[in-house]
Amino acid sequence: MVFPPTPAANSNPSASGAMITTDTIIVGGGPAGSSCAWKLNRAGRDCLVLDRETFPRTKLCAGWITPEVVEDLEMDPETYPHSFMTFPAMHVHIFGLSFAIPVPQHSIRRYEFDRWLLERSGAEVANHYVQDIRREGGFYVIDGKYRCTYLVGAGGTRCPIYRTLFAPAAPRSADMQVVALEQEFPYHWHNGECHLWFFQGGLRGYSWYVPKAGGHLNVGVGGIADSLKRRKDTIKNHWAPFTRTLHDARLIDGIDFETGGYSYYLRDAADVGRRDNAFVVGDAAGLATRDMAEGIGPAIRSGFRAAEAITGGRPFGYDDAARFSTVNEVARRLKGSKIFAPRRRAAA
Ligand SMILES: Cc1cc2nc3c(=O)[nH]c(=O)nc-3n(C[C@H](O)[C@H](O)[C@H](O)COP(=O)(O)OP(=O)(O)OC[C@H]3O[C@@H](n4cnc5c(N)ncnc54)[C@H](O)[C@@H]3O)c2cc1C
């Protein structure tokens, strides 16, 4: 179908005339929404992505991605047109010990990556702040202005689809909430490794140093909100000790920080992700891994699954999205090892 011209952001719906109708509306153009749109578009299905922000937009995130993310997205690091870096190992600092774990990871900048994914999806995108969702005559109606048969909630932690259609059936557990502070800034780093500090100052969480290709650096600290609250602590209290660690390790020098904060949810037991023709994916569903709080991979996988459910290929579920980063990594390595290699049949 052909869409009417993309409406201006949040223009008065009553003044916009006819309702814009399409097969699927995806609320949120982050990795979850754009992955869903990419799959739908490839299957020849119409979809419209609504996002309150215009891309490129800032998304607070360390921007480290796993080899699976690269694989799932069929990314070719050679032709990816933005910052992309590979770390052969993660440098872990814990209880005074430091060691390298040979787990390859990559870094991207979300500012670039998210726009690239959304553009590549080929989907129509409109700048619109979704507020009101209703069910009318077999359609989902958004703000009296957009109408669709299938609705995908990919709006992150504050997703309006989650809030309106899923929150009562799938409430989020307070003990799964992560709070994080971070900053990404231009910096001529001299140490091009990825460093992680666990449990510093009694934090149930970790802090990170993630260099980006082309001279940016992302540093941050995140922990479980409930654990901080019980100790009458806040994530802000951990910022100054963390930046002292970075200075002492000679990883940074002379930076005046202006951090930003965000919160999101780790994967819980509740898995209610579909109601009628509505789905929630990515952070909207609270799918970040339980151990490392990685959310990009689960956002992509759940976005794919929503698309596959819409096109009728597979029933919806979150079973493709790993609950734990580390277990997933071990499984990935074992899969490639001889233990799981198919046995050869003896020649007759
Ligand atoms: C500080 C920090 C560091 C992190 N580091 C990592 C990391 O290194 N690796 C990793 O894998 N994960 C990391 N995560 C988690 C990761 O950022 C998220 O899990 C991931 O962005 C989820 O993607 P998403 O598409 O579900 O949501 P988002 O990327 O949040 O996208 C949601 C989109 O919905 C739009 N939206 C929201 N509300 C509305 C509305 N009402 N109307 C219209 N549009 C709306 C927003 O503008 C946004 O573009 C980090 C998170 C934080 C906070």
Image (cartoon, helix red, strand yellow):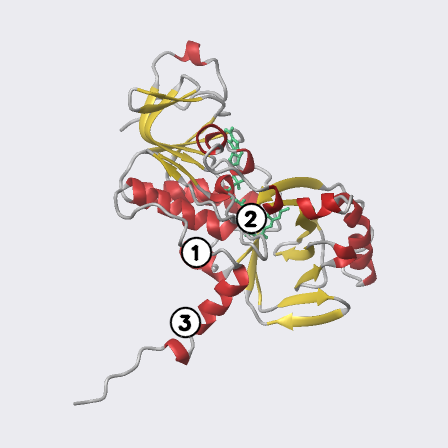
Name the residue located 78 percent from the left edge and 43 percent from the top edge. Answer: 232
Left or right side of 89 for 116: left
Q: Quadrant of the N terminus?
A: top left
Task: Report, in whole angstroms, how far the alpha carbon at label 1 lies from the one at label 2.
Answer: 26 Å
Q: Nearer the viewer, residue 298 or 72?
A: 298
Q: Which residue is mark 1?
A: 75
Q: Give x and y (percent) for residue 155.
A: 50, 35
Dot 1: within a 10 Å radius of its alpha carbon, few (fewer than 14), some, or many (20 or more) residues?
A: few
* Badge 3 amino acid: Lys
Task: Give how far across and how far down residue 12 sits, in percent.
Answer: 47, 13
Task: Work out how far the residue at label 3 is from the one at label 1, CA to CA, in angstroms.
Answer: 21 Å
- Residue underneath mark 3: 335
Query: Which quarter of the rendered picture does the C terminus lie within?
Result: bottom left
Q: Which mark is residue 266?
A: 2
Q: Residue at x 32, y 24 (%)?
A: 139
Residue 344 marker: none
Q: Position of residue 292 (x, y in %)?
A: 59, 56
Q: CA distance from mark 3 to mark 2?
A: 26 Å
Q: Using a 10 Å C-alpha cutoff, classify the residue at mark 3 as few (fewer than 14 neighbours), some (14 to 19) or many (20 or more).
A: few
